[in-house]
Amino acid sequence: MNSGSIIRLFSLAAIWGASFLFMRIAVPELGPAWLMFGRVLLAALFLALVAVAFKRSLPIRGYAGHFMLLSFFNTALPFLLFAYAAQTLTASLLAVLNATAPLWGALIGWVFFRQRMSVKIAAGLLLGICGVAILVGFDATANSNALPAIAAGAGAACCYGIATWYTRLAKPVPAFTNAHGNMWGACLWLLPLLWFIPLPVAEPASQSLYAVLALGVVCTGVAYMLYFRLVQDLGATPTLTVTFLIPVFGVLWGHLFLDETVGWHTLAGAAIVITGTMLVTGFSLNSLRAATAPVKE
């Protein structure tokens, strides 16, 4: 892994970790539906410009159903659930809940696809549950009134697990095409909600609008470009390290910009969830070295 890849990896983790910060800033004035529609629309427009610049077409015929199904579980529903949860939970807790997506993927594989549940994977799932329990049990914002928000955050991570399995089983589609079609599909899913859910405030503050812009262009559009470049340069296994770095930046940004308290429970819970995720995904330093080692001819 060269210096350029390391910079891109940490940049991606920092950007995706910041998405929970921007959600916390904008959701009180925009609400979950308008906030997430603005996010996916801006991301779709950004990726459309990238597609024009690199002369990449978006095939609709024969792929419309795929884009709609993928966008529902990979973008529209989890984004909406996280935005709902952001009205109550801290950015730190949201980032850690997001890191449980691989745990949900393993559980879905075991329950619905008869994937073998090894001792290592079972231990990882147990650790992940314990880590979230520590966070929820000791986080001041995670009281009994926050249970719906916690369930929404966990549900969003579960959606990512479903989307991962769908992507594995679906007909292969180029990564950029998937991302581009995914965003337009999410726009179609979220658009009808705007007719029934009014804006919480008549004139949102400029900081909320800037947060939407950052979410759409930077945290979604630019982040996808960084992600694709990392997968191209390093492969899927090393790029998976971003999953473990996102909670670190989510906690950091929440503390620096929202004055969120970082107690022992935050650090311990995040560390346990990350460890559990590493066990479930089979990630290790040895696998990272093997995946990034130069090929000898």
Image (tube, rainbow, N blue to C red):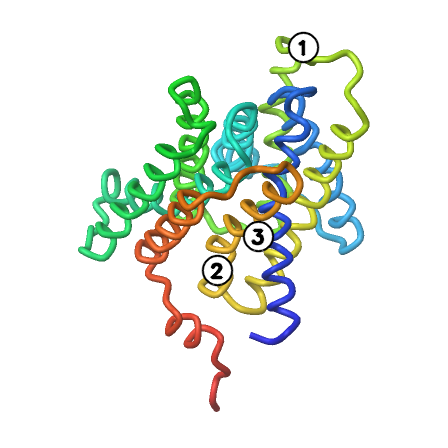
User: Going by the image, does 257 lie left or right of 95?
Assistant: right
Crowding around mark 2 (Cα neighbors within 10 Å: few <14, some 14 to 19, many 20+) is: some
User: Up-down: is 74 above or below 77?
Assistant: below
Secondary element at image label 3: helix
Check disc 1 and report the residue beneath it.
198
Position of residue 26 measured from the top left corner of the image (x, y, whole percent) = 68, 27
Q: Nearer the viewer, residue 108 or 81?
A: 81
**Amino acid type of the residue tagged 3 in the rendering:** Ala
* Residue occupying image coordinates x 69% and y 50%: 222
Residue lying at 78% horizontally and 49% vertically, measured from the top left: 52
Q: Secondary structure at mark 2?
A: helix
Task: Locate residue 153, reporting x and y percent.
Answer: 45, 31
Q: Is residue 116 above or below residue 188?
A: below
Query: What is the CA distance from the residue labelled 2 to the residue labelled 1?
Result: 39 Å
Residue type at mark 1: give it. Pro
Q: Residues within 10 Å of mark 1 (few under 14, many from 20)?
A: few
Single out the mark in the foreground, 2 or 3: 2
Please give the label number shown on residue 175: 3
Question: Please, what is the three-letter code of the amino acid marked with disc 2?
Answer: Thr
> Are circles 2 and 3 on residues that touch, CB within 8 Å?
no
In whole angstroms, how far apart are the C-alphas of marks 2 and 3? 19 Å
Left or right, 244 with reference to 10: left
- In space, the residues marked 1 and 3 are separated at their CA atoms by 35 Å
Give x and y (percent) for residue 109: 28, 44
